[in-house]
Amino acid sequence: MSLSSRYSMLLPLVILAFMSLLSMVFAITQGSVSLSFSAVWQALLGQGSTLNQTLVVELRLPRVMAGFATGGLLAVAGALMQILLRNPLADPYVLGISGGASVAALAAILLGIGGVFMSGMAFIGAVLSTLLVFGLSTRLGSTAPMRLLLTGVVIAAGWGALITLMLALAPPHKIPGMLYWLMGDLSYASTPWIAWLVLIPTCMVLMPLGRSLNVLARGPLQAAALGVNVKSLERLVFLLASLLTAIAVTTAGSVGFVGLVIPHMLRMVLGNDQRLILPASALAGGCLVTLADTLARTVIAPEQLPVGVITALLGVPTFLYLLQRGRL
């Protein structure tokens, strides 16, 4: 790769990284109680008032970190799903992974289980859904993208029916919490580090595979003709996208449209080189969810909205615009 090509690829990532840092700083300073940058810095250093330290270190910082990681996970998973299925409408939830996590999480709420245990059940539900989709879609050792997609859609419909049944049978006092989780909620995301420990290594694994993913996006026959092990690469992409989605849903519930819209918007601006699109998706997706969550907890403060509501309100018109422009 020439020096000019490296520069043209590095510059957008530097800009997105700077925007991401600004979005996180802005999110920490804003809320029902606004703080200055100096007050936030003192709180991070263990100085200033006890109230500011509690507000920044124990409440806002974990939430902002969780929101950014969730957005990055969903955006990268969406980009991978679109490559795997060669379908511009594919998103992280298309294979029913979110549905499996949602059923398990709602079951935990009904049983009165919260915190880490609910997150653990949500992750187990996502993994079981992934295994179910992959097992049912595999025939004679091969997984066709269309078969995988159709199986995922059917499984997602089944999970949706179970979710509706659980909401219908749930006690009235538990329904608000269940609905907030289904719409995406970062209020209880106090342990974001697991999401970061998955996001960063996954991006590092995907970077060397950028050339192979570029070829795979053009079709399996062309990829095989150029020496790519299509079967192994497709399985790896599926497993990584499923893992990213499972961790994102476990962290923040179902946050929609991030994995669908972000990769498309980046391709409109940056082209279709996966070596650039994948890390850019992680940064842009994290920035979007961070700002959306900031808006969700400030627009009607001290009340809070589910972050999934904000991403949907932003994602729907953006998606319709892309359709109108013929980008999908």
Image (tube, helix red, strand yellow):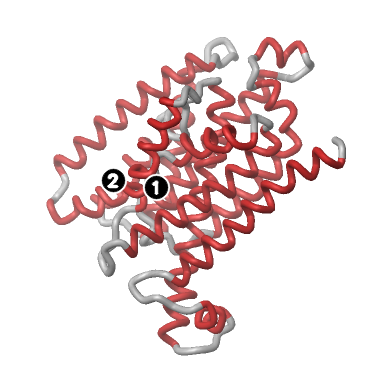
Residue bearing mark 1 = 121
Q: Quadrant of residue 123?
A: top left
Residues at marks 2 and 1, CA–CA distance in whole angstroms: 9 Å
Q: Amino acid at mark 2?
A: Ala
Where disc 2 sits, the SS reads helix
- Asked if the residue at tag 1 contacts the one at tag 2, i.e. Cβ–Cβ closer than 8 Å, the answer is yes
| Image position, residue 301 (x, y; %) | 28, 67
Residue nearest the observer in this picture, 182 or 52: 52
Image height of 172 relative to 215, above or below = below
Q: Which mark is residue 107?
A: 2
| Image position, residue 319 (x, y; %) | 41, 33
What residue do we see at 52% from left, 53% from top? 287
Image height of 217 relative to 180, above or below = above
Q: Quadrant of residue 182?
A: top left
| Image position, residue 310 (x, y; %) | 35, 49
Residue nearest the observer in this picture, 302 or 152: 302
> Which class describes the residues within 10 Å of circle 2: few (<14), some (14-19), or many (20+)?
some
What residue do we see at 56% from left, 33% from top? 79
| Image position, residue 58 (x, y; %) | 45, 73
The residue most toward the right is 2
Residue nearest the observer in this picture, 162 or 144: 144
Image height of 2 relative to 217, above or below = below
The residue most toward the left is 172
What residue do we see at 76% from left, 11% from top? 225
> Which class describes the residues within 10 Å of circle 1: few (<14), some (14-19), or many (20+)?
many
Q: Is residue 94 left or right of residue 277?
A: left
Q: Amino acid at mark 1?
A: Met
Where disc 1 sits, the SS reads helix
What residue do we see at 58% from left, 46% from top? 282
The mark total stands at 2
